[in-house]
Structures are given as C-alpha cells and as structure tokens.
Amino acid sequence: MTIMKSEILSRSTEEKVLPVILADIEQAAARIAGGVACTPLVRSSTLSERTGQPVHLKLETCQPIGAFKLRGAMNAILSLGDAERKRGLVTASTGNHGRAVAYAARELSVPATICMSSLVPANKVEAVRTLGAEIRLVGISQDDAQEEVERLIESRGLIPIPPFDDANVVAGQGTIGLEIVESLPELTTVLVPLSGGGLAGGIAVAVKALKPEIRVIGISMERGAAMHAALAAGKPVAVREEETLADSLGGGIGLANHVTFTLCRDLLDDIVLLTEDEIAEGIRHAAREENITVEGAGAVGIAAILANKVELSGPTAIIISGGNIDPALHQKIVSRAAP
C-alpha cells in the first residue's frame, strides 16, 4: 500500500529541511571508512529472470557482524568525544544493533551495555555476549528494553547509542545508498527492510539526493509493523510487538521519534507488508537459489518480489540487511517445502 509521495524532494538538501541530509551521509562515509566493509552488490540471475528487470542484492551480510547495523553504530560512536566514550555506552536492541555497538565498542576500547527483551533470539544474545558487552535482559518488548536504557542513563551516566532514531546512526546507514548509486548508476528502485526507519530513511536521503526519481520501498511484516502504523496514523503510535520470523524488524519507533518518522513520511514511496509464509519463502529462496544465509528481516525484499507485491520498472537493488539467523531455525525453514 502506498503511504505518501514526497513533495519536498525537489527542494535543495542545503535547505536542511530534513533531519539528515546528503552531506551528513558523505561525512559518515569518510568517518567509518576502514572500520566498516563496503559490501558487494551482486546480480541475482533468478530474480532478474523472474521480474524481467536487472535485480541486484546488496550483501550487508558481509559486514564483520553479519548485518548493516555496524555502519550507524560506528558512525555514532566515532562522533562522540573522548570524555563521552569513557563514560560508557548503552543501547536497546532486537539483536543486530546491540551486536554492532558491542563490536564497535570493543574495537574502540569503550565499555558498552546492551539491553534486550526476551523476544530477542538466543543466538543474537550470545553473539553480543561473546563480544564482551554487558547484557541486560528486560521485559517482553523493545520498549521494555528502552526503559532499562533510560534508567541506566540516569543512574550510571551512560551515553545512549539509539538503534535508529538518531541523526548519526541514520547517516551511517545511509552510506549504503551512496555505495549502491556508485555501483549501479542506472538504479530505479531500492527495496529496503523497514523497522524503526534508520536504514530506510538513511538510504532514501542518499539515493534521492543523488537521483530524485529513484523509488524507495520499505518492506516489513504484517505482525507489528510499527512504522507502517505510525505513517498510517500520521504520527508515532504504540504498536504491540509480536513474534515474527523478521525479528530484527520488531519494536516500536518511539512516541517521541524526532528523526526517522519524518524521513520515512517524506521520502518513502511505498510500504509493503508480508505474511510469515512469504518471509519464510524469501529465506528459502536466498539459501536455495542465491546461496546465501539470510535472516527473516534480510529476506523481506526477496520475499516481496516472490509474492508479486512490488512492480519493478528498471534496475533494482535489494538490501540484504543481515544473516544472523539461528542455524536450527534456518535449516528447518530451508528444508521445508514451499507452501
């Protein structure tokens, strides 16, 4: 379903209408160079044949932590002063952002505390633990984990590294957009996993500043799609978090959201919602046809094409946002026959 066509895309980014602009993303690219991988953009012969258009996969699975989140976390932490870093970092996470903060903190010799809920898969919790961060498991939702973050900021003076609603985090994620346009100048469409909007918003800022005609389509799940609900309501709203194969897309956007809601409202061209069976088929296709291991959130762009929920009109990039799926769950999904 279409949410909104942006009417401000023709405005110069120099007007600073948006909370993040191209210059912020270009600065982030320079800041994180060397600490974050410039990931491959590879052509999918199967999806290209299926759609009749060139389809490419942007493999953020090739990041050191197996997910795109390292870009935003690294940029945000490197933007802090030495005194702030020494106080220690804290964040709430559905898994991959916590892993990114823990990894970046370890690389920069900074203490970090990661707050997660009981809905975060055990393999993602263990991955954070392995990186040496302090872990707090709190409640049954991302909102519960965020409440613990606020408590630790107040009681211990820790510095927050938000998972998405932060200009430096968004700018870091937007570096993906720069890489895609550089590799595929004829790009017409980008399919982006949509959760809190840091990834989709950042990429949209980058690609539309360079080529305003590019469509950016957010892909989410039917179960608890918080940004979709917020855009439909015209403001951030509370959404019940539910279990889903796209677990990394879970959680609310924050009722006080001040960055990503604006970006997604003004820049996304469309939002597509997927069933659990459709997400599972995306995971299966990635494994069987593309030879890549992809978590549910990373498979939604592929799934949207397989479910015939997007129409392509030219060269397309799909953001494969992460591959950190529990191995047993992955094997179960891949070995099962398609519905």
Image (cartoon, grey):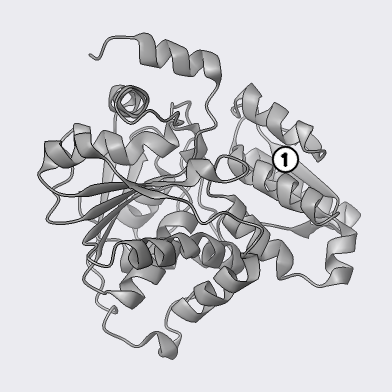
- The amino acid marked with disc number 1 is Cys
Residue at 72%, 40% in the rendered image = 115
Residue at 42%, 90% in the rendered image = 15
**Residue where numbered disc 1 is placed:** 115
Q: Is residue 250 visible?
A: no
* Residue 38 drawn at (x, y percent): 51, 57
**For this rendering, which residue is in front, 126 or 118?**
126
State the SS at label 1: strand
Residue at 25%, 14% in the rendered image = 338
* Location of residue 320 with respect to 121 vertically, above or below: below
* Residue 69 drawn at (x, y percent): 57, 50
Q: Is residue 166 visible?
A: yes
Task: Name the side, left or right, on which 183 lies relative to 325.
Answer: left
* Location of residue 240 with respect to 235 vertically, above or below: above
Label total for image: 1
* Residue 155 drawn at (x, y percent): 89, 53
